[in-house]
Amino acid sequence: MNPMLRVLVGIALVVGPSAGECADDNAAVGAPTYLARLRNDITALVGPAICANLVNCRIAALGVNACGGPAEHIAYSWRSTDRAALDTKIAEYNIALEDAQKRGYPVSACTSSPEPVAACVNGRCVLPAGR
């Protein structure tokens, strides 16, 4: 992740419009709720992931596993997704997840798998099962 983006997102988490919540409080106490909200925001940004063909589809890494790699990948469409907003929200999610894991939130298993390949199926970017 771009170090400058990480710093900016970290600052936004601490001073952002969180109605008095501190990033540490979110990670320690309300981590599941906070992470679920961020994950829902990411899903909303991806939206229907509309594609005409495979060229429209992209892959983004999400989360952090025990080895430091991504916990999962998501498919999105560059045609229908605001990439800057998605990158910012993913960075926010990843930082919050790392902080929560440092405070005892369960870490996903250490797995090393190749980056999946997206597909355009029925007009939507998807990650085919079994790839």
Image: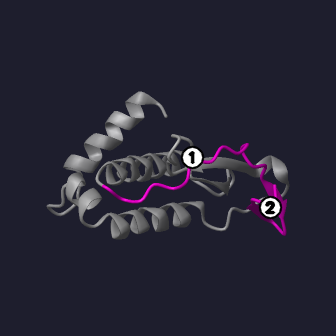
Q: In the rendered view, would you say 121 is above or below 4?
A: below
Q: Is residue 65 left or right of residue 36?
A: right
The label on residue 128 is: 2
Residue type, label 1: Pro
- Name the foreground residue: 122 vs 21: 21
- Secondary structure that dominates the magenta span: loop
Residue 74 percent location from the top left of the image = 64, 56
Label 2: how many Cα within 10 Å (few below 14, some 14–19, many 20+): few
What is the magenta range? 104-131
The label on residue 96 is: none
**Tag 1 residue:** 70
Residue 10 percent location from the top left of the image = 30, 42
Tell me which residue sits at (32%, 63%) in the image: 31
- Name the foreground residue: 94 vs 80: 94
Q: Is residue 22 left or right of residue 5?
A: left
Q: Nearer the viewer, mark 1 or mark 2?
A: 1
- Residue 126 lies in the magenta stretch: yes
